[in-house]
Image: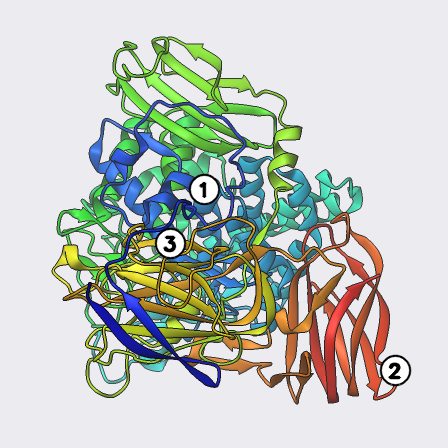
Amino acid sequence: MPRFVFKMQLGQRKLLVLIAFVLPHLCSGQDPVRPYPLPDEYLSTTSILDHQSYISSLDDKQWYLDNIPFVDLPDKNIQDVYYYRTSVLKRHLKYSHGGHGWLFTEFIHPVSWASKLQTIPDSAAHQILEGRWLRDPDYTKDLIDLYMRAGIEALGGISYTHYIHRAILEHAWATGDTDFLVTQLPGMIETFNLWNATQNNGTGLYHRTPLSDAQEYSLPGYWTGGPNGGKVDVWNAFGNDFNTIWLGPETYRPNFNAYMVANARAIAEVSQLANQTSLTQQWSDRADTLYGQMRDVLWDEDMKFWIDVVEGTNLRVEGRQLIGYFPFRFEVGTDADSIMGLEAGLTPEAFLTEFGPTTLDQADPYYTEFKNTTYCCIWQGQSWPFSTSVYLGTLARLARENVSTVVTPDLFQQAFEAYTMTNYKDGVPYVAESHYPTIDEWSGDTSNHSENYLHSTYIDNLFTNFIGIIPSLDNRLELRPLVPSDWTYFAIENLPYHGQLISILWDQSGSHFSNFTHSPGLSIYSSSTLIHNQPTLTPLNVTLPSNSTSISTLSSQPRFVNILSNPNAPWGLPNISADYTFSSNGDLSPYEAWKMIDGLLWYDTTPDNRWTNNQSTTPFNTISINLPRARKFDSVSLAIFADTDRGGVIACPSAIMIHDRNGTLLASRNPWDGCVPNALNTVLFGNSNASSMGNSTTPQTGIEVETDFLSITLVNQIHYAVAVSEVQIWVPATTGPRYEAEDGLLGTFIGGFEGKKSGLNCTIQDGGVLLGNGAWAEIADVRTSESSGGARNLTIVGGGNGILDVQMNFLTKSTVGFDGVNVNKTVEVEFLAGGNVVTMFWVDGKPWVDAIVIE
């Protein structure tokens, strides 16, 4: 029996561990397929489709089985892009920090222009709309809480325009969770008002540069970036102001102002749900006034189209851009004149191309079919999924409501098919930033940056525009399909809607889905129960089973947090290190160990995000983990990367051993037969007498350890190396009343390491946190015992000499001072229902915080 002897560092002592590579598997138990229970695992569902067969090409299959609705469609291009776009969502899921929870990123790697925790507001609404169709509700609810309670825009400043408030309302239409929606009202108002600084007192309109509208190199820049502030005549003329061409001038834009109308109306609707009559009227009036001002300034009567107007000079930028189609998507400009103007541009001479629509009318003199610069992002005609996905919402609404002789279901289907084919590269589904409108090639596709770009919707367009699901707060399911008339079948299974799992089955003959007993026609199932059947694929509006209990049950499921994620890694705690790191050039390694705890998880070769021991001189390597304090947990989850199926040398480890600081063996899999490549593998600790000799321990639930340190030794298979994309430690969320300061977010970067530091001058000391000059410490998901809102006493347990400002949800502020004698300071603060964000900002001196306690 071959054996290897190696040394492993554990704390201050070295432990000789003898590993037997060929030992009998002693495990009678089994590791779980996921690190924590599914929130909706108690729901029953149908069994129409073989789910595994649709995800054979995807990594980490268990995640898809747990989280996505499954579809079967006659158009395989649409079907393939759908499943690919669910993988885009997964790739961009980032676990930000214990308490703050989940978010979606826009770019696959961190970028310097991002906001707190790598959020970017311009893409957030798209992410909320896509994410509302995932079964785990925390993915999108955590993101909403970040924007409405964690000061994304308050801390870093407003940046990009967005329709987040409207998206929050549309999220509730799908979830039915009005309780969660109403709790967001204070944050919705506060964050809306941050944008008042961009409102012109004369016109009443909001203005932003096209770059800050996420659309640089737009038409206003060409109208004002030429010599002496005039129009650009020749692109490469020395007299041009290329900064203005790029940024564009401060501009009243129809899409931005439509966002703000929609956001204000969303606040009015939520105010009505909260029985706030005066607020409802105030925000309804504000929306109506803004729309009237849009009509006065931004509507071009001759073109019958929405146009840009330069702020200050009121220069009218007379050209049709695709953003003129945005307002109708948000029920802004729905009169006959507006519809007539939209119809006029839907020709091959204007916006329609094979891979379009174009973002600028092709008849415009500034239209550029092919980029005239190597810069990534051109809005003078390139096809952008961001714009197309909004534009499709307008077309779908026009087609459904039968208010246009031009925008018919057939035209919408053609537009959706063009969008689908744009989501391809080299014959496989793919999305980047921008696409050439007339050839099958991406124009904005930077390596290790633009891949799988998440600033558009597709899943939401498929469900709500194409299939025709019309979500609402009512206890009903409305369906108004826009699918081709020759579709004789389709199925959607496990669609989360109002706390239930909905299945929609269209089988004209009743014979296509032969493995599932059903009647011909269109059938609707709610959590496996048939609630409606009709013979034709025509609009329907059916009452759902009583759902108030379903919604509250789902929203009250236990929460779990990953205590190992550190958005500031490699700075601060938790931290992770390895005794070997592969460096391809002998200098800076792209495979640093800290990437295993950055909250980002995918399994692509490029873009990369992993640690590997490739080319290590030993057949095993050890990862060391330090937590801010000792915590109780019963397992560790490792996202194991492998590329042998791509011709690489990375494979599953042959064995794994986990020890605590004292050298106690917590878990061993030797051999690790259960390791699944390119998947999250959870290793349960075992109550075993197995020693450090490498014998396998028996996985057992409920075997907790309490430690602040782990070492994880991974053993290579012969001829192969190992790689880990992420390591996670999941525990039940803290339920209070005490929340430890060391568990908080101790400052962060605004825009990643290329951005700026904010509040990082914190030190974990004596079981608490010492705040230095400019520091802040933030504890999220702080809840009262009943998760309700209202005034409560909050005690800051601490000491030192100094002053702190204590902010609640970036809405209210209290000041506390420590004089070195009185170690507890109690203030009355206003809690919101659900999880609150408590941020303690340094003001003076050297205050030290041990914990916060809700009295």
Q: Looking at this view, is 640 or 479 the one in front?
A: 640
Q: Secondary structure at mark 3?
A: strand
Q: Crowding near pointer 3: few (<14 within 10 Å), some, many (20+)?
A: many
Q: What residue did someone put label 1 on?
A: 134
Amino acid carrying mark 2 in the image: Asn
In front of the other: label 2 or label 3? Answer: 3
Q: Quadrant of the C terminus?
A: bottom right
Q: Which mark is residue 364?
A: none
Most foreground residue, 580 or 96: 580
**Can you say whether 516 is above or below 836 in the image?**
above
Task: Give the image location of residue 405, x and y in percent.
Answer: 34, 27
Q: Secondary structure at mark 2?
A: loop
| Mark 1 or mark 3, earlier in chain | 1
Distance between mark 1 and mark 2 Cα atoms: 48 Å
> Which amino acid, by three-letter code, is at mark 3?
Asn
Q: Residues within 10 Å of mark 1 (few under 14, many from 20)?
A: many
Q: Which residue is mark 2?
A: 822
Q: Which residue is mark 3?
A: 681
Q: Which of labels 1 and 3 is toward the front?
A: 3
Q: Tell which circle, 2 or 3, labels the residue nearer the N-terminal end.
A: 3
Q: Amino acid at mark 1?
A: Leu
